Image: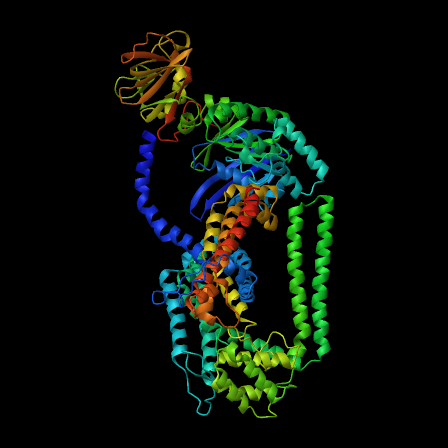
């Protein structure tokens, strides 16, 4: 009697929250499960249209997994997985960063000697220097007015402006790095902890817009920095015989292979003699695989360099008709109306090089379409042309525009975001919770460097890593929406499952049934992944 | 086996805070030395400098014939037992003990025998496959001991190893450590803040305070002849009684007077030793056991009695502890023969064993005037 009364009182206290949860969370979840079993599309079945909603069973699921939507679904699924490739790198990076930041970087005496006023003075000088450079564009050349790009919202860029942006960017970069180094010396790790966490305080969309600017193919900071080394490499390749590069590539791959072989042999010997355990051996294998992949990749790229760099501009066995058909083929895909493309295709003169043909089309199509056009044409021109899309030898990638590079660009950004964000904070907290006596015991036992990390730091951080891996996996499977929305508008093969869900639900036909089915498939995937993580992870944490 | 020599060792933090001042001591081969003192006295810092976990600001430390100032902890041939055990939580007891040997690249079978032997010696063979979190505090402490012993080092370093154990276990483990030391005969430096531990364990005791060594001697010598007031107050339970007063000459002898009612006549030999302090402020010190209700034997008078206000009686069995207040407000404890009808709350006259009375010069570290240190 009394316990029943207590239960009722407890329920009464829980009720406000419980009602909210039932009405706004649990109810909609159940409702969406029902929706996923219907053919409900808002354009057909709505308040103005009396058409009934039909129960169709698992047809939506069948369409997505094996039916007519499955090509798109699995394509977008693999895009999602591709974007998740950055997660382990990000986690490893945030661990390394946290370990660097948890040690004191500055001797106390030095930081005491630099007073606050000196600090402010130096920062002011650097900042005003940077501002002066940016606000003083110098004399504008009179004759060059060639328009290079016309991205939306960014206006037109001339060669001169791109040059200015490049030099301003360099100056700003140097000023920033200088300021960072100075602040780092003055304030030590506290300063760096703050700086590395700062990005997490920025709103996601603002961040993506900034990165979009960084990734701009022409004038963006990243390509501005990639340009000179690639130009140098281009001229180096042009002025040397190709066999030199073949030999270099094979040597690089060979050295990597030999190193790996010796590492494996040492590992097997140590394992057999009982000098090291199976864990150390597996760790060693991981290093070997990474080294092998890096060596092979570097070697292959080097071997390919002459083919890349020496490909003459615009040489093609395509005729004007071929190009015209490519243009037509791309009509729907690129979102340009068919008639426009047909008329454009008709205008292509015979006997032009593909480059000229594309240049001819350029004013009428968006930069995106132009780039994809170039890509298709070149992919038919020379099968050896990998990696670099533009027809200018070794040029920097067209990051967010070409479907070959867009996902990589998003992964790079994700790694950057993942390293300095909350993962780093979690690892910092985890590191500060490791009892210093463990390190002292390890020092007396003779563990240092790698063995100290493997035997003390890593096991002590296992719960933190476990948490981070679970949260990152969930976030990764749900991720990619804002990136696709803000940075690529879903183009260049960057659509992930969430973006797909959004598109199905809120674009075109408003197919709520199909979209709900996507949501439930995603739920199942996340559930399975998390369960697997828990199964494997909790074993590791307890060990 | 090795001698440990600390040659005028100093530790200064951040150029200003002196943690250890001029620590100069030679620890003989096989000796058990206890560093004792209140927290913050520099005893742990000294130990950590020997271990190599703390840099030495000045002076040299040698283990055996080798100066180890710039030698890494792992190469100093030492083993350390920490207060909170510092066992590797994800390793089994076996691995915890074998870890240091594995890093030294000893052959596997040799490691195995050594771990098994040590475990047998400590009675923890049945725990070898468990992880530390499945062990009780006492078992963990044994594993920590085992981890140190299995290394067969030249020097054992203990940093308050018993303070996380309950009182009963502390006493038994204490005895066990002493036993182990007598079997292994390894040079040992042991840090504690517990004076009882220090007294029972050490061949010699180093009493420290505020970074300075106050006295180094055998436990009984320190107990009987504390070098200064601090040492006298620190060692012994219940602690020594102190009364502030003055040395004055009257009736042909030297008297200690607190200005109120206490007037004690100093025996001849003692009087001649402290004669130079005539007229100066001194502190009288005597252990609770140097008091008696009856003026018999060594407590015979004259001029050795003082009357105190009693407040609380704590029976201990054979004896009772009587808390008293002197006329000047000082708190004293008398440990006397037990009797059932002790008049609590009355003024009682006690007699002192004047041969066990000390006189200290004024101040917290006032030197012992009766037993001046060499």
Q: Is residue A201 above or below residue B45?
A: below
| Residue A19 percent coordinates (x, y) | 33, 47
* Of B206 and A176, the residue lying toward us: A176
Q: Quadrant of residue A290?
A: bottom right
Q: In the image, A400: left or right of A122?
A: right
* Of A144 and A121, the residue lying toward us: A144
Q: Residue at x 40, y 27 (%)?
A: B229
* Of A82 and A134, the residue lying toward us: A82
> How is the structure coloured here?
rainbow
Quadrant containing the N terminus of chain A in the rendered view: top left
Q: Residue at x 53, y 76 (%)?
A: A398
| Residue A150 percent coordinates (x, y) | 45, 82
| Residue B84 percent coordinates (x, y) | 50, 35
Q: Is residue B67 among what the camera can see?
A: no
Q: Is residue A371 among what the camera can see?
A: yes
Q: Is residue A28 above or below residue A181?
A: above
Quadrant containing the C terminus of chain A in the rendered view: top right
Q: Quadrant of residue A8?
A: top left
| Residue B344 percent coordinates (x, y) | 29, 12
Q: In the image, B342: left or right of A436?
A: left
How many numbered marks are there?
0
Q: Is residue B313 above or below residue B154?
A: above
* Of A36 and A94, the residue lying toward us: A36
Q: Residue at x 42, y 12 (%)?
A: B317
């Amino acid at each position: 009697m009394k316990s029943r009364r207590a239960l009722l009182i407890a329920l009464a206290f829980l009720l406000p929250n419980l009602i909210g949860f039932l009405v706004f969370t649990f109810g909609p979840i159940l409702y969406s499960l029902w929706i996923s079993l219907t053919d409900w599309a808002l354009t057909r079945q709505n308040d103005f249209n009396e058409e009934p909603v039909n129960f169709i069973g698992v047809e939506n699921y069948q369409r997505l997994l094996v039916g007519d939507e499955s090509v798109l679904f699995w394509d977008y699924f693999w895009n999602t997985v591709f974007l998740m490739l950055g997660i382990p790198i990000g986690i490893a990076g945030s661990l390394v960063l946290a370990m660097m930041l948890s040690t004191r970087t500055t001797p106390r005496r030095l930081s005491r000697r630099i007073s606050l006023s000196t600090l402010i003075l130096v920062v002011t000088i650097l900042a005003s220097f940077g501002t002066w450079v940016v606000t003083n564009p110098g004399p504008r050349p009179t004759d060059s007015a060639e328009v290079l790009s016309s991205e939306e919202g960014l206006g037109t860029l001339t060669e001169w402006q791109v040059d200015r942006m490049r030099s301003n960017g360099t100056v700003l970069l140097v000023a920033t790095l200088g300021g960072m180094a100075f602040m780092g010396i003055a304030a030590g790790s506290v300063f760096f902890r703050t700086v590395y966490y700062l990005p997490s305080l920025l709103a996601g969309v603002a961040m993506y817009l900034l990165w979009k600017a960084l990734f701009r193919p022409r004038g963006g900071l990243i390509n501005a920095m990639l340009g000179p080394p690639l130009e140098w490499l281009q001229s180096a390749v042009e002025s040397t015989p190709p066999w030199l590069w073949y030999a270099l590539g094979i040597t690089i791959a060979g050295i990597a292979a030999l190193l790996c072989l010796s590492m494996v042999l040492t590992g097997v010997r140590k394992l057999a003699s009982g000098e090291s355990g199976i864990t150390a051996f597996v760790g060693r294998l991981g290093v070997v695989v990474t080294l092998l992949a890096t060596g092979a990749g570097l070697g292959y790229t080097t071997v390919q360099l002459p083919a890349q760099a020496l490909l003459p501009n615009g040489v093609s066995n395509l005729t004007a008709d071929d190009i015209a058909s490519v243009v037509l083929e791309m009509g729907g895909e690129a979102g340009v109306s068919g008639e426009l493309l047909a008329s454009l295709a008709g205008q292509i003169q015979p006997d032009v090089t593909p480059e000229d043909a594309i240049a001819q089309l350029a004013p009428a199509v968006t930069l995106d379409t132009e780039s994809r056009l170039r890509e298709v044409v070149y992919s038919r021109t020379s099968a050896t042309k990998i990696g670099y899309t533009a027809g200018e030898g070794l040029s920097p990638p067209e990051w967010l525009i070409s479907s070959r590079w867009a996902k990589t660009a998003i992964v790079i950004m994700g790694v950057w975001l993942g390293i300095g964000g909350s993962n780093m904070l979690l690892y910092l907290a985890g590191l500060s919770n490791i009892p210093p006596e463990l390190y002292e015991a390890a020092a007396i036992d003779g563990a240092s460097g790698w063995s100290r990390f493997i035997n003390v730091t890593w096991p002590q951080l296992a719960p933190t890593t476990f948490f981070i891996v679970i949260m990152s996996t969930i976030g990764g499977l749900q991720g990619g929406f804002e990136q696709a929305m803000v940075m690529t508008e879903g183009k260049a093969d960057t659509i992930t499952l969430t973006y797909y869900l959004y598109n199905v639900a809120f674009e075109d036909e408003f197919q709520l049934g199909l979209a709900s089915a996507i949501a439930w498939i995603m739920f199942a995937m996340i559930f399975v992944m998390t369960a697997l993580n828990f199964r494997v992870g909790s074993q590791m944490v307890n060990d | 086996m090795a001698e440990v020599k600390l040659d005028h060792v100093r530790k200064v933090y951040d150029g200003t805070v002196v943690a250890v001042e001029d620590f100069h001591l030679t620890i003989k081969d096989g000796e058990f030395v206890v560093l004792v003192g209140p927290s913050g006295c520099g005893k742990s810092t000294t130990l950590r400098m020997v271990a190599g976990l703390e840099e030495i600001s000045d002076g040299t430390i040698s283990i055996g014939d080798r100066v180890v100032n710039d030698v890494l902890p792992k190469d100093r041939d030492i083993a350390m037992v920490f207060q909170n055990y510092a066992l590797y939580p994800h390793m089994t007891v076996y691995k915890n003990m074998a870890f240091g040997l594995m890093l030294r690249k000893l052959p596997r079978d040799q490691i195995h025998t050594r771990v098994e032997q040590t475990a047998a010696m400590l009675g923890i063979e049945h725990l070898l496959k468990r992880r530390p979190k499945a062990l009780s505090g006492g078992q963990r402490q044994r594993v920590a001991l085992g981890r140190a012993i299995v290394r067969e080092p030249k020097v054992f370093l203990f940093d308050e190893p018993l303070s996380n154990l309950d009182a009963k276990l502390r006493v038994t483990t204490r005895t066990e450590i002493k036993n182990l030391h007598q079997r292994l005969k390894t040079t040992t430096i042991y840090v504690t803040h517990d004076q009882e531990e220090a007294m029972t364990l050490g061949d010699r005791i180093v009493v420290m305070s505020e970074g300075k060594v106050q006295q180094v001697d055998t436990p009984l010598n320190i107990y009987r002849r504390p070098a200064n007031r601090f040492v006298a107050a620190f060692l012994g339970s219940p602690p020594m009684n102190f009364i502030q007063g003055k040395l004055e000459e009257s009736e042909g002898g030297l008297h200690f007077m607190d200005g109120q009612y206490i007037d004690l006549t100093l025996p001849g030999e003692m009087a001649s030793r402290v004669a130079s302090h005539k007229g100066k402020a001194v502190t009288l010190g005597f252990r609770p056991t140097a008091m008696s209700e009856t003026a018999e034997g060594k407590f015979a008078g004259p001029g050795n009695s003082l009357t105190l206000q009693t407040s609380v009686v704590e029976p201990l069995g054979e004896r009772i502890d009587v808390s008293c207040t002197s006329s000047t407000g000082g708190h004293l404890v008398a440990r006397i023969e037990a009797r059932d009808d002790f008049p609590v709350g009355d003024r009682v006259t006690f007699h002192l064993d004047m041969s066990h009375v000390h006189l200290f010069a004024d101040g917290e570290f006032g030197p012992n005037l009766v037993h001046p240190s060499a």
